[in-house]
Amino acid sequence: MRHAGQVIDGGGIDERNNRPDLAAAIEDLRSLLGSFDEVAPAAMDARFHIHAYNELDLACRTIIEAFDRERQASGDHLRE
């Protein structure tokens, strides 16, 4: 399983803090969800679900952080 925020080619990284931008974070989530589709139902045991939950949690937090950075960069501070 690929980890959220992992960018292989170095593209899509916010160079100020070395974190993925929103588009890269969304692509990582798509990749993660695709990897879930490749898991056989028989392999979806408790360990799989714990790991999947942790991966989804990380992916969602990465997207939220990337969205917040993008919103702040554009001057949209409505939720602050």
Image (cartoon, grey):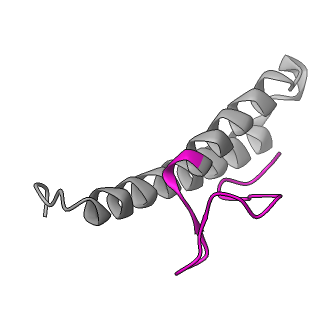
Tell me the quadrant of the picture where the C terminus can be found: bottom left
Q: Residue at x 57, y 55 (%)?
A: 58
- From what the image shows, is residue 42 above or below residue 32? above
Q: Residue at x 73, y 36 (%)?
A: 31
Where residue 78 sits: x, y (%)?
Answer: 10, 55
Between 51 and 5, which is closer to the camera in this rendering? Answer: 5
Magenta-tinted stretch? 1-23
Q: How many marks?
A: 0
Quarter where residue 42 is shown:
top right
Residue 55 is left or right of residue 57, and the answer is: right
Where residue 15 sits: x, y (%)?
Answer: 59, 76
Where residue 3 sits: x, y (%)?
Answer: 73, 54
- From what the image shows, is residue 56 above or below residue 6? above
Q: Residue at x 74, y 58 (%)?
A: 7
Residue 18 is left or right of residue 80, and the answer is: right
Magenta-colored stretch includes residue 12? yes
Residue 32 is left or right of residue 79, and the answer is: right
Q: Residue at x 71, y 59 (%)?
A: 11
Between 16 and 68, which is closer to the camera in this rendering? Answer: 16
Name the chief secondary structure element in magenta.
Answer: loop
Where residue 6 sits: x, y (%)?
Answer: 73, 59
